[in-house]
Image: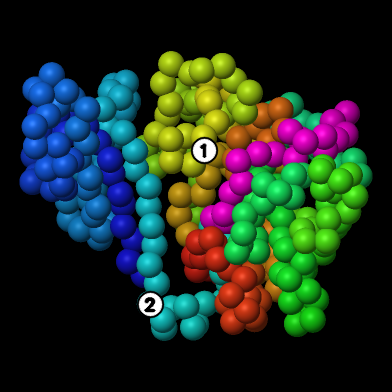
Amino acid sequence: MIETAHYRISEVWAEQNLPWPVGQSSEHKYPNLPAELRPLLTRSIDISTSDPIFAPLHQLIIEARRQNCTNVGAVWVTRKYTQHELANASLFHLAHIHEVNFTCGDHGTEYQSDEECPACGFGRTLIGSLKLPVKQMPKGIDLVWTQNRNQILCTSRFADTVIQAGLTGARFRAVIDTATNVVSNAWLQLEVPPDCLSLIPPSQCGDSFLNLDPSSKEITVMTSKAPTSPQKSWWMRLFSTSEITATNRNHVCPQHLYRGLRILTEAFVGQAEMADFMATRDRMGVLSYDITPSPLLLISPSAHKVLLEKKLLKGVRIEVGRMA
């Protein structure tokens, strides 16, 4: 497995602070840029996490963020697997699914919140069926998240394939098309009960790759209907179009296994009874008016093979899951 860290930082900050000649400036794209606009330039650094420079580089950027430096921009990690690793994997983590820019709560979906945990949203339950604008659903994609990643939607083709292949662990619920107020023939809700798997070390969760402590007070979380924010955090620029607002909410709730905003490593899980679709008890993500932390979704090699052969994983980023 090749793991690569991708940094997007201020070119001026990089020139002043980095002792290594790494990355590429965006300056070549703007050869006639006035000097007063040079602070707008960025430097792209894509570096393997096995590179000797990676650890000191990452630590330098973390220290800059701790000093409230906003010029260090964004960082994310990608993982690329060999065919041998994929062929011998015992689990596959659906690390990212194509996302539509709404939640079903925006379109009339109702929830029961009387027993909801105020720290993490655990206990919020759906009343009736999800409601969504079918016309806004993407073409050529069979599996999507809404901005609330607890809301996983799939095409009828996806559901039919899972049922016909005899894959276990998934169930499907009807959704209501808000344009007609009747059950959609094209889309369904995919549900996977989050009671199969538990994350174990060396899995690591946190707020970001620059802030590994999910209980830190120096955080920013998403609110889908927030006013314009003075500054977007790096992870919001990468993962959502919503505005953000500062808060002191901790992103942990041990009672309900709320671990932070995201998983930062591969997903390592303990031994459990296998199904073809599985979800972790551990949850990650933000808490907002219609958004609650969600479990990780994993599938078996059998499910991966079937969905891959039927070309039902477009828009899905797959990582290998590790079972103890």
Q: Identify residue type, mark 2.
A: Thr
Which quarter of the rendered picture does the N terminus lie within?
A: bottom left
Distance from the alpha carbon under mark 1 to that under mark 2: 30 Å
Judge depth for marks 1 and 2 and give the one in front.
1
Q: Name the residue that disc number 2 marks.
A: 82
Where are the magenta residues, as a range? 96-115
Can residue 296 be seen by looking at this rendering? no
Q: Position of residue 185 (x, y in %)?
A: 83, 61
Is 62 rendered above or below residue 145? above
Please name the residue that numbered disc 1 is placed on. Answer: 240
**What residue is shown at x 52% (from left), y 35% (from top)?**
241
Question: Left of 40 or right of it: where is 65?
Answer: right
78 relative position to 284: left or right: left
Q: Identify the secondary structure beneath mark 1.
A: loop
On whether residue 106 falls in the magenta region, the answer is yes
- Identify which residue is drawn at 60% across, 64% down: 140
Q: Is residue 240 magenta?
A: no
| Relative side of 318 to 63, left or right | right
Image coordinates of residue 274 in percent, x first then y, are 71, 73
Kindly identify the residue that appears in the image at 77 percent across and 31 percent down.
117
**Which corner quadrant holds the C terminus?**
bottom right
